[in-house]
Amino acid sequence: MLGSSVVIKNKKGLAPRYAFWDVDFDSGVISLNSSGGGIAIGATPIAAESYAKLALRQDAIHFDFFLHPGYLMVDVNPPLCLDVKDRRIADGTPTWLYPYNGSPAQQWNLIPLRNLNAFE
């Protein structure tokens, strides 16, 4: 699991334990809910066009959720954003860090877990 790519998945047939993420607004870490916070989104290096991978929490990317609301920003110079590669919403499409440009491929809708109908 560690080192696996963070990809877009069709929710049909996907076990919720692989679909739900915890967003820690204090630390900026996004972790896989089923890992109890131990596995999070990382990238090596933190640079443009680095693919998002599952990493231990201590190696996670620290996102800034408030720099540009609706975007998962990494506060480096130039600012990077979690982006869906090639703007493809298709099963298995990888995510990566890309310079912030405000495109739809960089916009994320964070939905509370208590709103489970979002997965239906």
Image (spheres, rainbow, N blue to C red):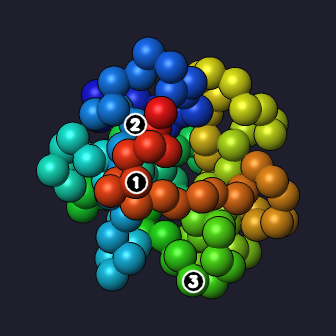
User: What residue is at 69 percent from the left and 43 percent from the top?
Assistant: 84
Residue 93 place in picture, x, y as percent: 65, 28
Left/right of residue 61 with respect to residue 73 in the rendered view: left
Extreme residue toward the top, this view: 13
Q: Disc 1 or 2, which lies upstream in sequence?
A: 2
User: What residue is at 72 percent from the left and 32 percent from the top?
Assistant: 89
On residue 19, the disc is: 2
Residue 32 place in picture, x, y as percent: 30, 46
Res. 10 image quadrant: top right
Residue identified by numbered label 1? 115
Residue 40 in view (yes/no): no
At label 2, which amino acid type do we have?
Ala
Cα–Cα span, label 1 and label 3: 22 Å
Q: Judge the density around disc 2: few (<14), some (14-19), many (≥20) Cα neighbours within 10 Å.
A: some
Residue 41 place in picture, x, y as percent: 41, 50
Residue identified by numbered label 3? 66
Q: Judge the density around disc 3: few (<14), some (14-19), many (≥20) Cα neighbours within 10 Å.
A: few
Residue 52 place in picture, x, y as percent: 51, 44
Front residue of this view, candidates 103 and 15: 15
Secondary structure at badge 1 equals loop
Residue 24 in view (yes/no): yes
Q: Are marks 3 and 2 in contact (CB under 8 Å)?
A: no
Q: Disc 3 or 2, which lies upstream in sequence?
A: 2
User: What residue is at 40 percent from the left and 36 percent from the top?
Assistant: 19
At label 3, which amino acid type do we have?
Phe
Q: Indicate whether 7 appears above or below 26.
A: above
Front residue of this view, candidates 77 and 33: 33
